[in-house]
Amino acid sequence: MDWDAIVIGSGLGGMSTAACLAAAGKRVIVVEQHEMLGGCSQVFRRRNRFEFDVGVHYVGGVARGSDGIIATVLRGLGVEDRVAWSRMDDAGMDTVSFPDHRFRVPTSWDGWAHELGAAFPEDAAGLRRCVQELRTIGEGADRIRDVPHSVGVVLPLLRRPRELARIVRGLEEPIDRLFGRCGLGPQARAAVLALVHLHNTPPDRTPALLVAALLRHYFADGAWFPTLGGQVLAANLCEVIQSHGGTVRTKARVASIDVVAGRVTGITLDDGERLTADVVVSNADAHRTFQRMIAPEHLRPRTLRRIHRFRRPHSIFSLYLGADVDVAAHRPATNYVDHGRYDLQTTYDLMDRGRWDPDGWLAISSPTLKTGGRRHVGEPGESSIEAFAAVPGDHAFWTGTGDPLQGRDYEDDPLYRERKAEIEETILERVLTTMPELRGHVVWQESATPLTHERYTLSRMPYGPENAKDQIGPFRRLATTTEIRGLHLAGASTVYLYGVAFTLRGGVGTASTILGRDLMGEFRGGAVLTDPAALPDHGPDWDPFFVCRRHAVKKPRRARAAA
């Protein structure tokens, strides 16, 4: 069982790393503990009528032939033309509600500034200054054509010293200071941060650069949703891996990353099976990688201290609804973001104290709405709706007993059941208030807590480590290389950050380091790493859901007994 490289975890960071390595001729295996590939990009189905996306809600940078990150990575791997996208409403990719204000978020800086000024006329001048500052930072960061993952990537901006200075300041200061310079009142400040669900970080720790970069991601060429759901991304990467000699395995949980004399030698699975390789890539989160899978004697004390100090963010509670009514019949392709309060900081202050804020932000996203009612699962006239909100992720908030990594006992804990029912009921009522046509038409309902997320992905950190100003940027986030020779990292814990675009880019960056090549530079130059003729045909019945399932290896009973 010798390999050139082993990739732990099938999130988009791990899958893009493996796809690049396989296409470059390396013998690669991806091991995934869940039965489905994709990590936070996976979907799940109920009654063969409703499909729900776990984490892919909308993205930017996918316009065909563009230099957007996602388009560039998919094109370089030969699958750009194999992913169909549905464009969201340019007049309002999001529809935002506060207690006394409502506005839309168009996919342009000027449109956004106009909407904000119209909703908050008393702060219109300050909002224009604030939006212009964010635009300068966002477009400046975009000019480097990369995620700001190292000092070297900002070199193209040395000829623009003022712009570079603003970008550095945008990274080093919380966005509250920008608001102060622009003289914004508390309600206008909340409006600028209305899309806090994109980063789930407290305002007093959110760097202006993060807000600017996220907005620029959508304002460059619009907001999009994969027409066949988020699973289409992992499915295409899986086909690249397999068609170029690689292997994927599901239901294969890693017990340890094996190290001898400071060099990685492979991994050991929970059942005792060993896989050997000189290169191991961990797509698991930083805490699990360094605190669970590597014996502490193989790590420097300062590394262990750093990981211990690496703050986890608050987590997410998700509500999934299936309805026998078509929400796209009378609504545009938009998301809904509902805020029960203007003081967004309070939501996070409460969670810091171990409490949940029932008036905190709530994001509502419907795959049916975003595709204009086009459905590839179930019958026309029905809808899938997803709602998610920030909640504490600590076990202590949810239950005093039961560990999701050891089984499902936590689901029967009285405290867990009480917490889950309370939050689900509150979120449901807020969804029905936002979309009243759903009343009396919900035919499927379930929810997922941070412990659910941990059971399926082994992490309560869908956004990676907290995206605060002291944990973003070179020398703050983890590099893709480690002190253990041959051990590399991919995913949201690295300098490439979280989200579809950044984790895909990060996987290319990790593979580039392993191969000693600038793959992203090659992709931008028009190179295609894969052999397109090797990829399987996509017929009219091609389904990414089934491409990503049933990759487990069923061992003979005698082998299982021996293990």
Image (cartoon, rainbow, N blue to C red):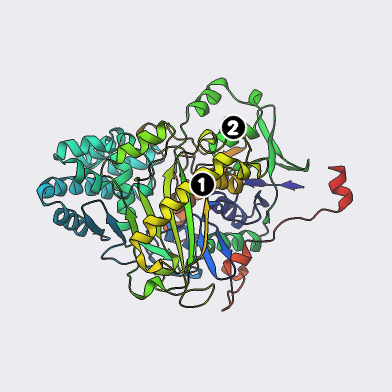
260 vs 376, nearest the viewer = 376
In the displayed structure, does residue 114 sit left or right of residue 401?
Answer: left
Q: Give yes or no for contact between labels 2 and 1 (Cβ–Cβ under 8 Å).
A: no
Tag 2, which secondary structure?
A: helix
Residue 161 vertical position relative to residue 533 in the rendered view, above or below: above
Q: Amino acid at mark 1?
A: Lys
Q: Position of residue 81 (x, y in %)?
A: 48, 70
User: Which residue appears at 31% of the width and 49% of the height?
Assistant: 339
253 vs 483, nearest the viewer = 253
Q: Foreground mark, 2 or 1?
A: 1
Quadrant where the C terminus is found in the figure? top right
Q: Position of residue 503 (x, y in %)?
A: 48, 49
166 vs 193, nearest the viewer = 193
**Which circle marks residue 290 in the picture?**
2
| Earlier residue among tags 2 and 1 | 2
Residue 328 vertical position relative to residue 434 in the rendered view, above or below: below
Q: Amino acid at mark 2?
A: Phe
User: Which residue appears at 68% of the width and 53% of the height?
Assistant: 250
- Tag 1 residue: 420
